[in-house]
Image: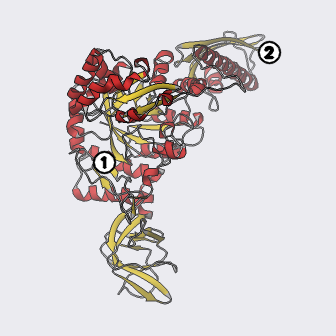
């Protein structure tokens, strides 16, 4: 399968491509679910697309437009779509179905991938996403191997699954915690990651712990099984991680896919990842949906790779030294962390001095091999360290050296459009016929240019085609590249180099101006068809309405007549646990607001084993005349259709 790696910024993208990613995914400064990552500008996006496509074999670049989008943002969204279509991005990763609809309508050449934020977790959802124009679907992380295999075998669309990285406590796209508490919506790319904070339970005296902090997904050990499902793409999470992290985790999975890998080599590669960044690892629900060991309630954040345990703290020459037997080679300037009792984070410090007991006197070693007892100088303000407390390597100079990668020179790569030039030399100057291809628009720019000047008969030698081509090929600082070139100089005239360069500058200026006008006209045409909401009159009175959604409709019995005033609609969840009571009392609950203001909600998550019972409920409600529904994902849409809606 394809190995898909994250690129939070240009350096991470180049690292991923160097260490074997078949494709990378990245975002711009807007409409990206990682809004606070470094992200890309259009210029840096152009550079990495050109670089990836120039590699052999060519690599792919996917752009995330995976936030929910507001109506007032649609002009900027369309401008962004037009720009990335022009650059030749290989796919858009989309959550918002409105965004997908605009892409299908205005940019049919753009390939669409359904984001995991769309919460597709069953075959019916994949089928509906395919009907909506998605060529690939990123499945929810919570599926088992068995479920993934069943969906793959249906052969509906390309399927992408996560293989490594951070996990959300909720299904992707459905967490509202950050939005409700801080007004920072994860579906707008601004999640505050509150699940990583500590919380206290309701029981008196219950200690704080990280009850929502998920371990990191790591499927290296079961990669053969995952590949055996037939999925098309394996995705690594981490657009907020460093280029170093992207390098080592991409290297791990590239090596596994290229296999075979010995157990020792796999352990070494995995430890390099842990040294750079790692929470505790989990395989989540790959083997069973009843895995309860998916949260690390004791610790949050980077731990590193465990390399030993505290043997002793020794006082020598006015300094405290940590003594332990290291399972990994250590160097000066590496980082160590030691677990502290009842503390949520380990104590970390840099290796500033090393000592090997019983070693000959002399200079301190720069590097100590694995398997040796070593003493590391502790900072003066270090806390007490318990004997046998775990010791981790949290930063490694060796890993940094192994993970170096090349970067192209600035300006070396850029998406360019081919220009065919026919240059005719006449007595009164130069005449150029130009045809520039715009693959993204399916059109061409055709120009006829006449340059000023005088071309006398040649005394020493006429202008040759090779000489003129070299001048016109100097387009490095532009978005154009010279394609076919033809010179017509039948009279053997001489043309000075300065005149050729001036003709080239005029050609580029004319092409740039035509391209600018073409872009502006395209955006005007796109925005003309938008159905934008009207602006409320300034200072005008606003009349507020409200809606209520509940999965506990019995609470409605306490509403009085005045409580229903200004209600927009009442939304009732059809997954109420007492279905028989729900079906019988639905008419009574709907009496006060009125049948026309009641909407029935399908659940936000529907798994395959629930389909039969849900289908039965929906059919009975449709038969009773209920036609207003709330859907949270493509699965619900497919279920309504299957029920006959």
| Quarter residue 334 falls in | bottom left
State left or right for residue 332 relative to residue 263.
Answer: right
| Quarter residue 315 falls in | bottom left
| Residue identified by numbered label 1 | 255
The residue at 45%/33% (across/down) is 61
Residue 46 position within the rendered picture, expressed as x and y whole percent measured from the top left: 55, 33
- In front: 469, or 569? 569
The vertical placement of 258 against 591, above or below, is below
- In front: 214, or 550? 550
Does residue 58 appear anywhere in the picture? Answer: no
The residue at 64%/26% (across/down) is 542
Q: Which color scheme is applied?
A: secondary structure
Q: Of marks 1 and 2, which one's residue comes earlier in the chain?
A: 1
- In front: 157, or 19? 157
State the quadrant of the C terminus. top left
| Quarter residue 131 falls in | top left
The residue at 48%/23% (across/down) is 98
Q: Is mark 2 on a helix, strand or loop?
A: loop
| Residue identified by numbered label 2 | 454
Residue 403 position within the rendered picture, expressed as x and y whole percent measured from the top left: 43, 54
Residue 288 position within the rendered picture, expressed as x and y whole percent measured from the top left: 21, 45
Does residue 633 appear anywhere in the picture? Answer: yes
The vertical placement of 449 against 615, above or below, is above
Q: Residues within 10 Å of mark 1 (few under 14, many from 20)?
A: some
Residue 290 position within the rendered picture, expressed as x and y whole percent measured from the top left: 22, 47
């Amino acid at each position: 399968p394809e190995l898909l790696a994250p690129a939070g910024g240009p350096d991470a993208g180049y690292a991923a491509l160097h260490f074997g990613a078949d494709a990378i995914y990245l975002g711009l400064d807007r409409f990206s679910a990682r809004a606070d990552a470094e992200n890309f500008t259009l210029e840096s996006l152009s550079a990495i697309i050109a670089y990836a496509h120039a590699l052999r074999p060519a690599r792919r670049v996917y752009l995330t437009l995976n936030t929910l989008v507001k109506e007032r943002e649609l002009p900027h969204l369309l401008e962004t779509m037009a720009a990335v279509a022009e650059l030749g991005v290989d796919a858009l990763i989309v959550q918002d179905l409105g965004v997908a609809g605009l892409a299908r309508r205005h940019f049919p050449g753009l390939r669409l991938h359904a984001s995991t934020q769309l919460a597709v977790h069953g075959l019916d959802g994949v089928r509906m996403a395919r009907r909506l124009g998605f060529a690939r679907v990123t499945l929810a992380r919570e599926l088992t191997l068995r479920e993934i295999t069943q969906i793959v075998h249906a052969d509906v669309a390309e399927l992408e699954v996560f293989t490594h990285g951070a996990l959300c406590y909720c299904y992707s796209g459905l967490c509202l915690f950050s939005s409700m508490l801080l007004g920072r919506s994860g579906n707008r790319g601004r999640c505050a990651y509150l699940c990583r904070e500590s919380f206290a339970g309701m029981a008196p005296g219950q200690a704080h712990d990280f009850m929502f902090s998920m371990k990191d997904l790591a499927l290296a050990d079961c990669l053969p099984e995952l590949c055996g499902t037939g999925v098309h793409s394996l995705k690594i999470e981490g657009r907020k991680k460093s280029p170093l992290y992207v390098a080592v985790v991409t290297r791990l999975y590239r090596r596994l896919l290229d296999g075979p890998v010995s157990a020792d080599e796999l352990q070494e590669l995995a430890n390099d990842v842990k040294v750079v960044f790692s929470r505790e690892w989990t395989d989540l629900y790959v083997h069973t949906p009843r895995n309860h060991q998916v949260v690390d309630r004791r610790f949050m954040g980077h731990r590193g790779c465990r390399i030993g345990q505290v043997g002793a703290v020794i006082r020598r020459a006015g300094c405290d030294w940590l003594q332990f037997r290291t399972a990994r080679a250590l160097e000066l300037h590496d980082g160590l962390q030691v677990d502290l009792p009842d503390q949520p984070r380990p104590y970390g410090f840099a290796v500033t001095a090393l000592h090997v007991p019983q070693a000959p006197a002399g200079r301190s070693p720069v590097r100590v091999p694995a398997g040796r007892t070593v003493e590391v100088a502790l900072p003066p303000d270090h806390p007490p360290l318990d004997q046998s407390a775990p010791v981790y390597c949290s930063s490694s100079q060796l890993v940094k050296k192994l993970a170096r990668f090349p970067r192209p020179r600035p300006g070396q790569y850029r998406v360019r459009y081919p220009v065919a030039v026919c240059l005719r030399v006449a007595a009164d100057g130069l005449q150029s016929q130009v045809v520039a291809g715009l693959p993204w628009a399916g059109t061409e720019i055709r120009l006829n240019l006449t340059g000023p000047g005088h071309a006398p008969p040649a005394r020493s030698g006429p202008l040759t085609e090779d000489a003129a081509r070299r001048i016109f090929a100097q387009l490095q600082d532009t978005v154009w590249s010279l394609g076919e070139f033809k010179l017509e100089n039948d009279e053997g005239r001489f043309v000075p180099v300065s005149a050729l360069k001036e003709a080239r500058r005029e050609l580029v200026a004319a092409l740039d101006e035509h391209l600018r006008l073409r872009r502006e006209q395209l955006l005007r045409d796109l925005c003309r068809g938008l159905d934008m909401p009207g602006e409320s009159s300034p200072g005008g009175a606003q009349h507020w309405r409200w809606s209520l959604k509940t999965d506990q409709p019995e609470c409605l019995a306490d509403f009085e007549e005045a409580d229903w005033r200004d209600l927009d609609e009442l939304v009732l969840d059809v997954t109420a646990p007492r279905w028989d009571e729900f079906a019988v009392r639905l008419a009574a609950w709907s009496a006060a607001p009125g049948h026309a203001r009641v909407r029935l909600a399908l659940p936000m998550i529907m798994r395959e084993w629930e389909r039969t019972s849900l289908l039965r409920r929906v059919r009975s409600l449709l038969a009773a005349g209920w036609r207003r529904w709330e859907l949270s994902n493509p699965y619900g849409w497919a279920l309504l259709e299957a029920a006959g809606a």
